[in-house]
Image (cartoon, coloured by chain):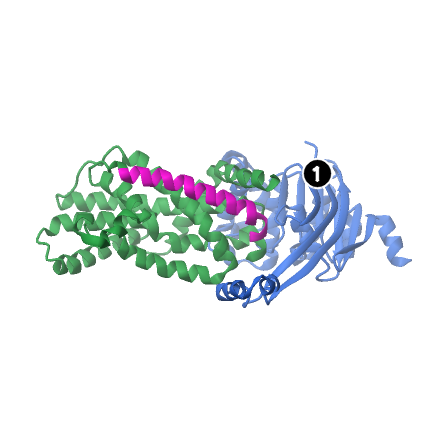
Amino acid sequence: MSCSVRLDGVTLDYFIYSVKAQSLRNAVFNLAVGGNLYKSQGDVTVVRALENISLDLKEGDRLALVGHNGSGKTSLLKVIAGIYEPQKGVVEVKGNLTSMIAHAAGLDMDASGLQNIRKLGAMRLLPKKVVESRIDGIVEFSELGDFVRLPVKTYSSGMMARLMFACATEFEADILVLDEWMGAGDAAFMQKATDRMKGFVDKAQMVILGTHNFHLVELVCNKVIELSAGRAVFYGTTEDWKAWRNG
Amino acid sequence: MEAIQAAFRDIIDGVRLAPLWLTLGWEQTAARFRRTVLGPFWLTANLLAMAFAISFIFGGLFGNGNWRQTFALTIAGILCWQIVGGYLADASNTFISAGDLMNTMRMPLTFHVCLMMYKNLINFLAQLIALWIVLFLLKLGSIPDISLLLGLPIVLINGALLSMIIAMPATRFRDVQQTIAVSVQILFFLTPVFWAPASMQGKRSIILTLNPFAHLLELIRQPLLGSTPSFVHWEWGIGLMFVLGATAVTMLTLYRKRIVFWL
């Protein structure tokens, strides 16, 4: 199945509501005073998280999102995943997308690893048979062993990362959107994960990865977008990016 | 125009995710009672305790000698109230409690509302079985009227639409949630849950004729107790669906995109 991601001039604003702005009393008082005050609403802060971002990805592309903390990596991942709809610009995503943005997102802490695998499978609308047939592969890849029968709350963050990554990649998706949480895994796991993501080229799947790990970028990704304060300061191939950073 | 289409698409996509919210609703209900001894029978215990307490106190206050009849009305009333109005405090919390999921996966808003409403239905059905057992043991039972099969969906659809309508402002303004919680308690007394509608006389009976919750309640309680609801209740039930439906679509059109930022 073919997949593609195209973003054109995407601009995203966050509205941050303080305690005061979330109070109904303030909104009502402001209404009574007149429209002027209402507009300012006291405590709504607008943050421009992304400004005029454009990119174009096709099958087999592995894009890295790099940049400082707060530069807009996660915001951009959320726009691609369809969680945030930008105020301006076009987002076109073709293909079946799996997003694993937050650490341990969607895991039920009180349920066992196996129950969570079934739940994550159900969330992707996979038939029960398909999920059951993938369980062995997931358990093997995540190397959780007998821990899969224990509640997830007993796992370390690295073990949760293993489970999430194994589910994300075994339940085949065309487009995989991952954020930094992967860094919780140890060196051996990172090696396995890297190998698996490289294999995406052959299957014509796509990976979009937010990371601070430049080594991982060079190993896995063929394209890089570097963000700074919500703007793309670099967008191109990994080789060009390395030259750009050094130059 | 595009926003209106997106609003309708949200509703359609949300309903079409039925296999998912049916599975998750069941699992989450099971998870709620994990490590308890009584399990889902806690719901039954709650219903019985409330019904006995209320019919004991108010049976005495109203001086109604016919204890058995009051009890049947009360226990059915309390049970039905949960999916007619009792769920509203939960409903206002729908998006806030789904916040984690909304921030990690793209889902129609309608999905979260359907999931919440389905969990309510499971609670209702679990207690319904208990109700029949108790009524049967007390020899108060009667065969439910066939109109329940129409009344229950009307109540559920109205509930889902109303949840959608109140959950949006409740996410933006955190006062709304508290307001709803207080209002639900008052509505519980204003609706003939544990008193007979016929005993309300004079001008005050306006709270019966103009209270939509009273009409919705009768749409399921009367069939449960073996009679057919009168025409006026159907009129209110179906009319409400259109009013709430139009409001929900309008609000989705205006605010759908923004809700994730309000969390």
Rendered view: B1 above or below A40 = above
> Residue B167 at what x, y percent from top left?
47, 52
Magenta segment boundaries in residue numbering = B232-259
Residue extending farthest to the right is: A247
Chain coloured blue here: A
Amino acid, disc 1: Gln
Which residue lies under the disc numbered 1? Answer: A205
Q: Position of residue A157 (x, y in %)?
A: 59, 59
Q: Is residue A109 visible?
A: no
**In this rendering, would B20 be left or right of B209?**
right
Foreground residue among B124 and A2? B124
Please provide percent x and percent y for residue A82: 63, 45
Q: Quarter of the image for the N terminus of chain B: give it.
A: top right
Residue appearing at x 46%, y 38% in the figure: B18
Q: Main secondary structure of the magenta part?
A: helix
| The magenta stretch spans residue B245 | yes
Pointer 1 local density, CA inside 10 Å: few below 14, some 14–19, many at least 20: many
| A90 relative position to A136: left or right | right
- Which element carries disc 1, helix, strand or loop? loop
For disc 1, the chain is A
Q: Residue at x 27, y 49 (%)?
A: B79
The colour assigned to chain B within the rendered structure: green
| Residue A70 seen by the camera | yes
Tell me the residue at 20%/44% (across/down): B133
Q: Front-most of A130 and B197?
A: B197
Q: Is residue B215 above or below residue B189?
A: above
Asked if the magenta segment contains residue B141, the reply would be no
Coordinates of residue B69 in the picture (x, y in percent): 13, 48
